[in-house]
Amino acid sequence: MIRNENEYQEAVRRLREERARLNDHKAHLEGLGLAHDEVKRAIDPLRSFQAQLAEEVESYERLKRGDLDEMMNLHGLGHGLVALRIALGLTQRELASRLGVHESQVSRDERNEYHNITVDRASRILDALGVRMRSLFEQPLAPPPTPTLDPTMKTQAA
């Protein structure tokens, strides 16, 4: 995940370089007289990397426009907090200042996507971002599956 403008600029530069590299490599392989399927097989890993990089760039650009995804059951909370900061146009330095911590702390937390964050800490970050989070409990569409015992399994005697 791209977390700041510097990472974004670096990713855009790398994407441009990777596109040129892929085109050059393809032309070189075709110049060697390789068959179409051989060329494709050779450059598919480069295309895959390029597609992943392009997806990250597009995702950051979406966030900068304020286009956030919905979060379910707090899965992806850390990713969501990073996305909120980006969508609000705040730098890591500005968030750190609002939280009263050093910028390196925010950078480290975001790099780890706030792994094992507490509810209290998430609440403080949301307050610093000036965001209110609403929760809604919904019943599942179907009842959860009932665990069944495998009749072929024998219980062990103590």
Image: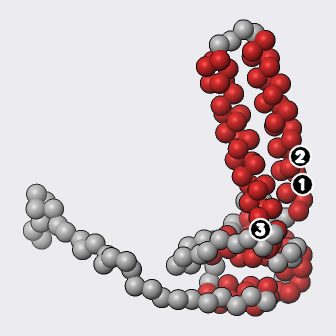
Disc 1 residue crowd, few under 14, some 14–19, many 20+, Cα 10 Å: few
Residue identifier under label 3:
63
Q: Secondary structure at mark 3?
A: helix
Which quadrant of the rendered structure holds the N terminus? bottom right
Q: In the rendering, which numbered label is found on residue 9?
A: 1
**Of residues 131 and 149, the one drawn nearer to the viewer in this rendering:** 131
Which quadrant of the rendered structure holds the C terminus? bottom left
Which residue is pictured at 78% across the width and 55% down the height? 57
Tag 2 or tag 3, which sits nearer the N-term? 2
**Mark closer to the observer (3, 2):** 3
Tag 3 or tag 1, which sits nearer the N-term? 1
Question: Is residue 13 shown left or right of residue 29?
Answer: right
Q: Secondary structure at mark 1?
A: helix
Which residue is pictured at 89% across the width and 79% down the height? 94
Residue identifier under label 2:
13
Q: Are marks 3 and 2 in contact (CB under 8 Å)?
A: no
Residue 41 spot, x, y in % from top left: 62, 24
**Mark closer to the observer (1, 3):** 3
Let me know if residue 156 appears in the view: no
Residue 136 spot, x, y in % from top left: 53, 89
Residue type pointed to by label 1 = Gln
**Of residues 152 and 80, the one drawn nearer to the viewer in this rendering:** 80
Residue 86 spot, x, y in % from top left: 81, 72
Q: Are marks 2 and 1 in contact (CB under 8 Å)?
A: yes
